Amino acid sequence: FCFLHVAAADDKTFQGPDPATEKVIRVSLHRLEKMFGQRGFGFQDEQNLKEKLSKLRGLGFESADQIAKATIGQGFPLYIVRLDTLRKYNNGTDPWFLLAKTDASIYPLLVNLKVRSSATVTFQQEQKEKAKIPHVAELGNPDLIRLLTEARMELQKEGRCLLPSECFAISIPALSLQLFGYRDEGA
């Protein structure tokens, strides 16, 4: 995990979850809560309870109650760096051109203001709909979302990354690498 600092002139502001996105995340959390709740999975013996707790902790939660209490924080738009673009990159050129915007965002899931997990939401064009419809692609990644959130908070203490559009997540799939990126308009 590392930082990528880029200078950019893109002034579009990334907004927090819109009502449709928040609703789809809440539905996914509710399903997860029911699945891991006392009646879910039929966990009866001690071994099954240990498996249940292990799976919950892998998602970043300690109990189904925490899932029910989760709130959705300010998300991170997701950019990717394609391998072919990375191969063409020349040292010293603006790294902003390496980034390709995706239709995905990563939202922190908080319990009592502490980052526990995340929801990755993609926006897909439905055939009959004119607008893009949000879908939860993944729940979990507690370590990644904690690092992204901590990095944003550190920069905010320094007076940077104050607008939501100035901080984002970057994925380089070919290298299995996740980065935190931020925009510095003054650079």
Image (spheres, rainbow, N blue to C red):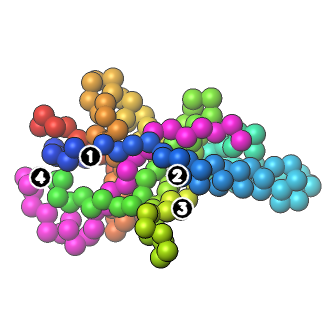
Q: Secondary structure at mark 4?
A: loop
Residue 107 rendering spot, x and y as whole percentages: 49, 46
| Distance from Cα at disc 3 to Cα at disc 2 | 8 Å
Q: Nearer the viewer, mark 4 or mark 3?
A: 3
Amino acid, disc 3? His
Q: Which residues are magenta?
A: 68-94
Give the residue displayed 48% in from the left and 69% down from the top: 129
For the residue pair 3 and 20, the one nearer the viewer reads as: 20
Give whichever of discs 4 and 3 has the lower sequence position. 4
**Which amino acid, mark 1?**
Lys
Mark 2: secondary structure: helix
Residue 84 lies in quadrant:
bottom left
Mark found first going from the N terminus, 1 or 2: 1
Residue 7 seen in the figure: yes
Whichever of callouts 4 and 2 sits on the residue coming sooner in the sequence is: 2
User: Is residue 58 visible in this depiction of the protein?
Assistant: no
Q: What's the amino acid at mark 4?
A: Asp
Asked if the residues shown at circle 1 and circle 3 are in contact, with their CB atoms under 8 angstroms apart, the answer is no
Q: Which mark is residue 21?
A: 2
Q: Residue 167: which quarter of the image?
A: top left
x and y, in percent, of residue 82 in the image: 27, 68
Magenta span has 2?
no
Structural distance between the alpha carbons of marks 4 and 3: 33 Å
Local crowd at mark 2 within 10 Å, few (<14), some, or many (≥20)?
Answer: some
Q: In which quadrant is the C terminus drawn?
A: top left
Residue mark closest to the camera, 4 vs 2: 2
